[in-house]
Image (cartoon, rainbow, N blue to C red):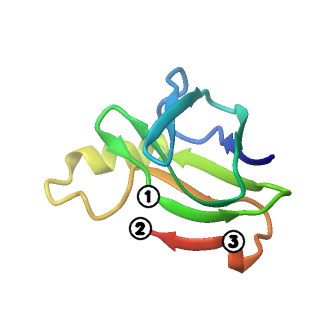
Amino acid sequence: MAAIRLERGTKGANMFRKFKVFIDDECVGKIKRGGKLEFPVAEGMHEVYCQIDWEQSNKIAVEVPAAGVDLLVNSKGLRESAERSLDPDDGGDKYLTLSLLGNPDSSSLIIEN
């Protein structure tokens, strides 16, 4: 069975809080700072995103091959978080960012929004 492997970086203001992980709109777990998780999935297309409170990362739809796919989630740093909280027009960028890890095969990333 294929797998989606998710790594969370150490950057960001939420050191002691976990991010919820969603695959195909189902909460499948929580990832802590510096953590690594693996979620067994069927080969094929899956939509992945992370969430903390009301903030959600970008959604990535990936074609997961038998070998699996590696993703990275991070939050904004302390300074970025403080600046963002003072900007009344904020909302154009994401507090959490989700991306393919390493040197991805471009055919595995289908949609990012």
Left or right for 89, reference 82 = left
Under tag 2, what secondary structure?
loop
Q: Are marks 2 and 1 in contact (CB under 8 Å)?
A: yes
The image shows residue 109 at horizontal and vertical percentages of: 62, 71
| Towards the viewer: 74 or 108 | 108
Q: Is residue 20 visible?
A: no
Residue at 85 percent of width and 57 percent of height? 67
The image shows residue 37 at horizontal and vertical percentages of: 71, 34
Mark 1 and mark 3: Cα distance apart in space: 16 Å
| Label 2: how many Cα within 10 Å (few below 14, some 14–19, many 20+) | few
Residue depth check, mark 1 versus mark 3: number of the one nearer the observer: 3
Q: Amino acid at mark 2?
A: Asn
Mark 2 and mark 1: Cα distance apart in space: 5 Å
Label ID, residue 58: 1
Q: Amino acid at mark 3?
A: Ser
Left or right for 97, reference 85 = right
Q: Which residue is mark 2?
A: 113
| Label 3: how many Cα within 10 Å (few below 14, some 14–19, many 20+) | some
Residue depth check, mark 3 versus mark 2: number of the one nearer the observer: 3
Q: Which residue is mark 3?
A: 108
